[in-house]
Amino acid sequence: MKNKIKLVNDLLVKKYGIPLRSKVPPKPIDLLIATILSQNTNDKNSFKAFQNLRNDYADWNSVANISTIKIEKLIKIAGLGKQKSKSIKQFLVTLRKEKGYISLDYLTNMDNGEVIKELTKYSGIGVKTASCVLLFSMRRNVCPVDTHVHRTTNRIGIVKTNSPDKTFTLLNKNLPNNIAHSFHTNLIRLGREICKSTKPKCLICPLVKVCQYEFKNLNSNSNYKENNFLLLDSIK
Ligand code: SF4
């Protein structure tokens, strides 16, 4: 599977380039709250919701002191306000109670599995959110799996699973070194622009010659003559 992932990553880098990264990684606590806010909305709205919280309050300690309803109002633009405000409030208050301060810097010395176990014990925080902290803040070689990564890696034939968490486990067991950021970011772009959930645009896809989904579809289409597809199954 390692070689399959590497091949797909190379093709995506050829198409989209190596995605930019911020010079200074965001603090884990900021990234975690931003990821909660980003669920089921676009980047613009989740960023605005994050700004609303941070512009009105000096630090997360101050946010922990306000009511869930007040948080809900501030983050309304990101949608799912009730659910997200509850998760944020509970997380901040519990972390402060447990540690005596609000920071996730203590995660630094933990391995990837320990970080995921630690963060997912909080209500409303799943494997995807925890793995975003690992990738974007802690710069670990971990590929978070959202709906786009789950859909595309299953269609391509890298994995065959029925849940994002299972996809996460398999992908990350087999991830080549130093590719998580480009692989994750470019797969999301592919999923948004080309490999959409309905009507994937296979004929303009950079993965068309290695994708099993396209291979199956075209094989059942007698009008389409090209048959020189490189099945990922032949790659170990
Ligand atoms: S060939 Fe089609 S199904 Fe396969 S990754 Fe590209 S768009 Fe998705």
Image (spheres, helix red, strand yellow):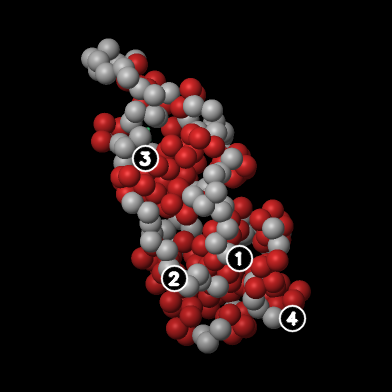
Place of residue 131 in the rendered image (x, y in percent of width and height, measured from the top left): 58, 56
Label 1 sits on residue: 87
First along the sequence among labels 4 and 2: 2
Name the residue at 55% across, 49% down: 177
Place of residue 223 in the rendered image (x, y in percent of width and height, measured from the top left): 23, 14
What amino acid type should be assigned to the residue bearing mark 4?
Gly
> Relative to 219, does residue 114 appear above or below in the rendering?
below
Label 4 beta carbon less than 8 Å to ligand 1: no
First along the sequence among labels 2 and 3: 3
> In front: mark 4 or mark 3?
3
Which quadrant holds residue 12? top left
Relative placement, left or right, of 103 versus 58 is right
First along the sequence among labels 1 and 2: 2
Label 3 sits on residue: 11
Name the residue at 37% across, 54% down: 18
> In front: mark 1 or mark 2?
2
Identify which residue, 195 or 141, lies in the foreground. Answer: 141
Q: Distance between the residues labelled 4 and 1?
A: 19 Å
Place of residue 132 in the rendered image (x, y in percent of width and height, measured from the top left): 54, 58
Identify the mark at residue 23; answer none if there is no mark: 2
In the structure shown, which secondary structural element does the residue marked by tag 4 occupy?
A: loop
